[in-house]
Image (cartoon, rainbow, N blue to C red):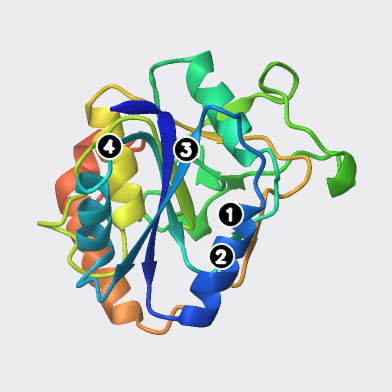
Amino acid sequence: MNEKKISFIICSNDEFFFSECVRYIQRLIKPEDIEIELIEIREASSMTAGYNEGMQSSDAKYKVYMHQDVFIRNKYFIMDIMNIFKEDNKIGLIGLVGSLVLPADAVMWYGERVAFGSEEVPVENYRYSVMEDGYWEVEAVDGLLMVTQYDVPWREDLFDGWDYYDISQCFEMKRRKYSVVVPLQKEPWYIHDDKEITNLWNHDKYRRRFLEEYTEDMQVTITKG
């Protein structure tokens, strides 16, 4: 693995969103010895398939898996995530929104999520500090943006659509004894131009599939629903 390289892996089907996403990435401040790689995956059959393709095509130690409609506004994003990983080599995955404990039904937005602190700082003056601000260790994160320092295959065999690729990846990390964290953000690190969920049938199908696979790994005792 190339420890001096960070790869941004993006499944794309909209040129406008993708180009805007890349424009924000190109504005990021990076250490002089770090190489930035952009990997666009088009016509992916699923999110897990696209992310596996991107993972296998890059030798970067640090990989950022992100939605095309996420725009990183924290200019120091690369430095900050690297500092978090260096803080503890057991951290396998960093997200920007997460659940301390995943609800029993495995629907993240039904439970308490963490991301932001109570203090708001103007973005032009804002700097994150691992020592002062810290991070939460969480059970799962939202897939809008996920950063890894270890390659763990995405469960393409189970999640062959567009749901639960993110939460399952967190549990795969935990099965390998890696932790999943969300940095405390006094000012949001990103803008997410997301859309409403349009297919709850597929969402519930993959939710049930998730519970079949990971029930025993969850922190709460649940009944499959």
Residue type (three-letter) at the residue carrying disc 2: Cys
Query: Sequence-wise, which precedes: disc 1 or disc 3?
Result: 1
Residue type (three-letter) at the residue carrying disc 4: Asp
Q: Which residue is mark 1?
A: 25
Residue that appears at 70% across and 44% down: 75
In-front residue for pair 135/73: 73
Q: Is residue 190 left or right of residue 121?
A: left
In this view, the residue farthest toward the left is 157
What distance separates the C-alpha of mark 1 from that of mark 2?
7 Å
Answer whether residue 75 is visible to the viewer in this image: yes
Which image quadrant for residue 70?
Answer: bottom right
Q: Residues within 10 Å of mark 1 (few under 14, many from 20)?
A: many
User: CB of mark 1 within 8 Å of CB of mark 3?
Assistant: no
Residue that appears at 78% across and 40% down: 186
What distance separates the C-alpha of mark 4 from that of mark 2?
22 Å
Query: Sequence-wise, which precedes: disc 3 or disc 4?
Result: 3
Position of residue 50 relative to residue 111, above or below, is below
Q: Which residue is mark 2?
A: 21
User: CB of mark 4 within 8 Å of CB of mark 2?
Assistant: no
Residue type (three-letter) at the residue carrying disc 3: Glu
What distance separates the C-alpha of mark 2 from that of mark 3?
18 Å
Query: Sequence-wise, which precedes: disc 2 or disc 3?
Result: 2
Residue that appears at 46% across and 39% down: 101
Query: Sequence-wise, which precedes: disc 4 or disc 2?
Result: 2
x and y percentages locating residue 68 in the rendered image: 48, 67
Q: Which residue is mark 3?
A: 35
x and y percentages locating residue 211 in the rendered image: 22, 52
